[in-house]
């Protein structure tokens, strides 16, 4: 096994149960009661300081607007967990594609068949 393979080998990576809500999740984004889009989240592995030795998880999130536009993936990680904490509190701050200014959107976690359908069609990680 190459050194890089050992470095990112996942079998002994800690799994943070606090992040389970964000594993392959879809969040409905509303503003003033109107659906504006969705936010998808996933959890991946990372190494952090000091000297990238500590193993931890990070959250990747992406906004998908109702007009079909997808923003670039963004990352969130501890100790701050800014976006994860916003989502836990039922909102997210992102740049509104209409105004290009940061705005607050109500964020509601989706479940069931509608979550499954949206996860497939939104293409978490794709750019459009």
Image: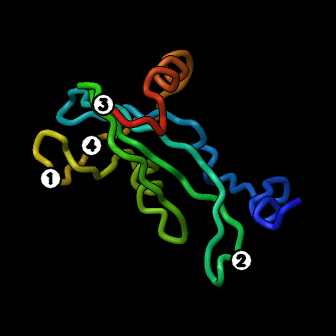
Image coordinates of residue 59 in percent, x first then y, are 54, 53
Q: In this view, which residue lies farthest toward the left?
A: 99
**Mark 3 and mark 4: span between their CA atoms?**
10 Å
Q: Decide: marks 1, 4 in contact (CB < 8 A)? A: no
Q: Which callout, 1 or 2, points at the residue further toward the start of the chain?
A: 2
Could you tell me how far apart the alpha carbons at marks 3 and 1 are, in whole angstroms?
16 Å
Q: Which mark is residue 101?
A: 1
Classify mark 3: helix, strand or loop: strand
Front tag of 3 and 4: 3
Q: Nearer the viewer, residue 78 or 1?
A: 1
* Mark earlier in primary sequence (2, 4): 2
In what quadrant of the picture does the N terminus appear?
bottom right
Q: Going 52% across and 22% down the picture, which residue do you hit?
A: 120
Judge by depth and name the residue closer to the eye, 36 or 107. Answer: 36
Foreground tag (2 vs 4): 2
> Which residue is label 3 attached to?
37
Horizontal side of residue 99 vs 111, given as left or right: left
Local crowd size for mark 4, using a 10 Å CA cut-off: few (<14), some (14–19), many (≥20) = many
- Answer yes or no: do the residues labelled 3 and 2 have beta carbons within 8 Å? no
Q: Secondary structure at mark 2?
A: loop
Q: CA distance from mark 1 to mark 4?
A: 12 Å
Residue at numbered disc 4: 105
Judging by the rendered image, the residue that carries numbered circle 2 is 53
CA gap, disc 3 to disc 2?
Answer: 37 Å
């Amino acid at each position: 096994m190459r050194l890089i393979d050992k470095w990112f080998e996942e079998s002994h990576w800690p799994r943070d149960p606090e992040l389970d809500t964000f594993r392959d999740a879809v969040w409905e984004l509303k503003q003033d009661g109107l659906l504006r889009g969705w936010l998808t989240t996933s959890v991946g592995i990372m190494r952090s300081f000091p000297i990238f030795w500590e193993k931890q998880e990070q959250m990747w999130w992406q906004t998908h607007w109702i007009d079909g536009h997808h923003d670039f993936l963004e990352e969130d990680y501890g100790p701050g967990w800014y976006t994860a904490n916003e989502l836990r509190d039922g909102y997210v701050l992102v740049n509104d594609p209409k105004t290009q200014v940061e705005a607050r959107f109500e964020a509601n976690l989706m479940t069931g068949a509608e979550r499954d359908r949206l996860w497939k069609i939104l293409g978490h990680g794709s750019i459009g």
